Image (spheres, grey):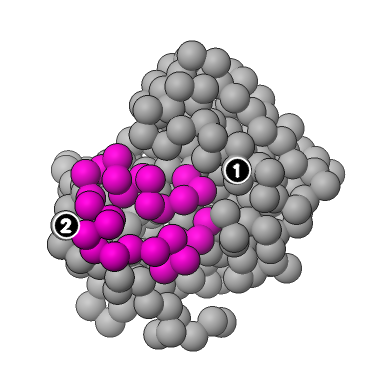
């Protein structure tokens, strides 16, 4: 396993950035009512756990480890889980610190370290539960950073990559969120380097992006696609959609593209 103590994004862990980048909220009430879902707490530090909700279809089914956007929690995907299960896919959404049933406070460094801990836990959990299907990593919006961190680090163990509304460059995103990156002296090479990390992954890749994304422009999805070195890569544009209504406007195309990628990997 990678020495996560060497992962340092402190340049992004400034209060003015964190307050714009993370919007944590708790999950109230009882855990999800879906009987096929199992609530998980993943130990990422001695006194910090990160929550997940694993929607399981079958032991032999392909597995999607999913990192959501900055204003979401795993409970927001309680309706999506059964949809994945109906396609014979195990769907494993996980939170960040401070989100849902997780403890701790979110920072960029913590998020990028935690995804390694989460990945190690998921690998072990799947093995212990006799889940033998291939493992695919997926990230939406902010979650694209975690997904690409993992695919750049575990090329052998990960069989496929899905990015939805992912960002290629940190600087423009931070500016849109109201961060004065020039005043902070921020340099792109100090950031997530998503567009660089995707170059190191050459397995099946699906990139989904809204045509009229008002937060992360479609050009970011195009840049990620152009940088991807896989011979099996797909860029799906959802016409007329923006960052927040991509499911509403293109759910059938979205899920069909996911199913196509997963089937290719599984078969």
Kindly identify which residue carries mark 1. 223
Q: Quick check: 28 left or right of 10?
A: left
- Front-most of residues 240 and 177: 177
The image quarter containing residue 37 is: top left
Residue 171 in the image: state x and y as whole percent: 38, 52
> Element under label 2?
helix
* 143 relative to 6, above or below: above
The image quarter containing residue 207 is: top right
Look at the image and say whether residue 225 sits in the magenta stretch.
no
- Return the disc, 2 or 1, that comes first in the chain's sequence: 2
Q: What residue do we see at 31% from left, 49% from top? A: 174
- Front-most of residues 15 and 176: 176
* Residue 262 in sight in this render: no
Q: Residues within 10 Å of mark 1 (few under 14, many from 20)?
A: some
- Find residue 189 and name its label: none
The image quarter containing residue 29 is: top left
* Residue 190 in sight in this render: yes
Q: What residue do we see at 27% from left, 57% from top? A: 182
Q: Quick check: 147 left or right of 227?
A: left
* Quadrant where the image shows the N terminus: bottom right
Q: What residue do we see at 40% from left, 53% from top? A: 170
Q: Quick check: 130 left or right of 169?
A: right
Residue 203 in the image: state x and y as whole percent: 75, 54
Kindly identify which residue carries mark 2. 16
> Element under label 1?
helix
* 185 relative to 241, above or below: below
Magenta part of the chain: 167-194
Whether label 2 touches label 1, CB < 8 Å: no
- Front-most of residues 60 and 206: 206
Compute the Cα span from label 2 to label 1.
27 Å
């Amino acid at each position: 396993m990678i020495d996560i103590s060497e992962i340092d994004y402190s340049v992004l862990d400034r209060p003015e950035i964190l307050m714009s980048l993370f919007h944590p909220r708790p999950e109230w009430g009882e855990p999800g009512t879906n009987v096929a879902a199992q609530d998980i707490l993943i130990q990422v530090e001695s006194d910090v756990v990160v929550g997940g909700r694993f929607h399981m279809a079958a032991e032999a089914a392909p597995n999607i480890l999913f990192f959501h956007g900055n204003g979401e929690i795993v409970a927001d995907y309680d309706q999506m889980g059964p949809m994945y299960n109906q396609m014979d896919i195990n769907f494993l959404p996980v939170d960040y610190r401070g989100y849902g049933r997780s403890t701790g406070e979110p920072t960029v460094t913590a998020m990028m370290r935690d995804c390694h801990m989460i990945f190690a836990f998921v690998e072990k959990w799947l093995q212990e539960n006799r889940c033998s299907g291939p493992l695919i990593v997926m990230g939406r919006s902010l979650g694209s950073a975690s997904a690409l961190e993992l695919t750049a680090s575990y090329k052998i163990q990960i069989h496929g990559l899905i990015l939805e509304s992912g960002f290629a460059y940190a600087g423009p995103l931070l500016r849109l969120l109201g961060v004065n990156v020039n005043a902070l002296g921020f340099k792109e090479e100090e950031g997530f380097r998503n567009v660089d990390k995707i170059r190191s992954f050459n397995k099946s890749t699906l990139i989904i992006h809204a045509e009229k994304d008002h937060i992360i422009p479609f050009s970011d999805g195009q840049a990620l696609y152009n940088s991807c070195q896989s011979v099996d890569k797909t860029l799906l544009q959802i016409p007329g959609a923006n960052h927040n209504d991509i499911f509403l406007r293109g759910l059938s195309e979205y899920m069909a593209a996911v199913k196509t990628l997963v089937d290719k990997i599984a078969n």
